[in-house]
Amino acid sequence: MKKSVYISVLLIILLSAGGCSARVENGAGNVPNTPEIITSHSESPAPSETLKLRNESEPAPKTYTYEVQARLHESLPEYRFVATGKATGAAMSEGDWAPAFVTGLSVYDENGLAILTKDFTDTLNEVDGNLIYYQMIDTMGLHVVDVNFDGYKDVLILNSFSGAHSNSWYDCWLWDIKTSSFIYSKSFTEICNPAIDWDKQCIYSSGGSGADDHDYSIYQYIKGQFVISNNLHWNASSSTESKGDKIITAVGIYVKEEKLVKGKMKTVRDCFLPHKAANALLKKYNSKEPWKLDSPRWYMMGGHHADVWLEHGSASNDR
């Protein structure tokens, strides 16, 4: 009888020990790594970004491809222009203003050979590509259009479309007639929110850092570079002056206008104007060339509404 009791007790102890051992092993390697288990860990909660990086169930970024077929000139064969990009699953659910990336650009000749290949990613420095808002991931700002007015089309793709003010800049490769190849134009990349005017052979650029701070520039292609020929800046401002014991404050705008003359920028106007005089001057800027600030060509922020100003012949005549 005693032997029977001893054996029963020993069996119970062994079974209990075996159960704990099996639970530990299962918890260490066999329990699914669900988000609930990660986020409910109360001892040392991790930041949400860390959780997102560690969550193996996070779907891989979705890749995008946009292709255009075009002739650079009527004398040349048709080429293929292919833009690639990516966006996370979170971006797809968050909508237009979520981040996305332009990852590459390739141009193929009539034989399918690559004549231009650019990779905008940098794994070593953790660069995912050219940062843009998700609303532009469908085309990635790819345009095949003549930007230096030589009769041959060039290629544009978004370099940046982000930030609080949603300004846009483009990478540009100009077609070089002599070498029959594309050459990168660094000076075009400096043009914010470009709007091309093929009739006047210039490019309008506008941007700002707030509702009361505006910059307008007109670019021309001179000696292989895009240079500013006209520049206008104005912002809300105030001026104070002392009259006896009183300090008088006037509210208006500060305005500075410059013009390119014989290769050098010359100041046309640099002053503060109170409201009445400022409104009169702004009416002139709004209605008269070269500015016509009422024109939609000064579109101030990127997006698909800018496409009309980057396609030859698609914009309205009211420039």
Image: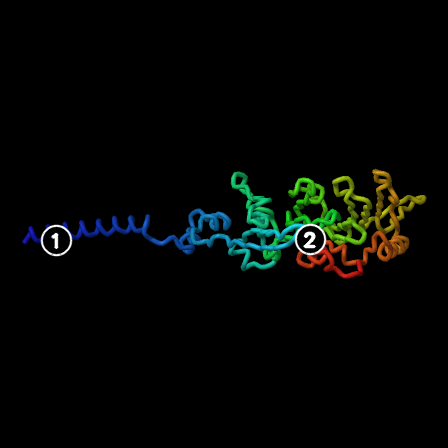
Q: Is residue 129 visible?
A: yes
Q: Which residue is mark 1?
A: 8
Q: CA distance from mark 1 to mark 2?
A: 96 Å
Tag of residue 36: none
The residue located at (75%, 52%) in the rendering is: 196
Q: Residue furthest right?
A: 244
Q: 158 or 212, which lies in front? A: 158
Q: Residue furthest left?
A: 1
Name the image quarter holding the N terminus: bottom left
On screen, residue 242 versus residue 97, left or right, reads: right
Horizontal and vertical percent position of residue 71: 65, 53
Q: How is the image coloured?
A: rainbow
On screen, residue 137 versus residue 44, left or right, reads: right
Q: In the image, what residue type sits under mark 2?
A: Glu
The quarter holding residue 287 reads bottom right
Horizontal and vertical percent position of residue 118: 58, 44
**Badge count:** 2
Q: Which residue is mark 2?
A: 74
Q: In the image, what residue type sits under mark 1?
A: Ser
Question: Considering the numbered disc 1 on the image, is that residue within a helix, a strand or a loop?
Answer: helix
Name the image quarter holding the C terminus: bottom right
Horizontal and vertical percent position of residue 72: 67, 50
The residue located at (58%, 59%) in the rendering is: 95
Q: Is residue 162 visible?
A: no
Horizontal and vertical percent position of residue 190: 71, 44
Q: 10 or 289, which lies in front? A: 289
In the rendered view, tell whether residue 270 sits above or below residue 133: above
On screen, residue 109 versus residue 49, left or right, reads: right
Number of other residues with Cα within 10 Å of mark 1, as a class: few under 14, some 14 to 19, many 20 or more: few
Sooner in the amino-acid sequence: mark 1 or mark 2: 1
Number of other residues with Cα within 10 Å of mark 2, as a class: few under 14, some 14 to 19, many 20 or more: few
Question: Considering the numbered disc 2 on the image, is that residue within a helix, a strand or a loop?
Answer: loop
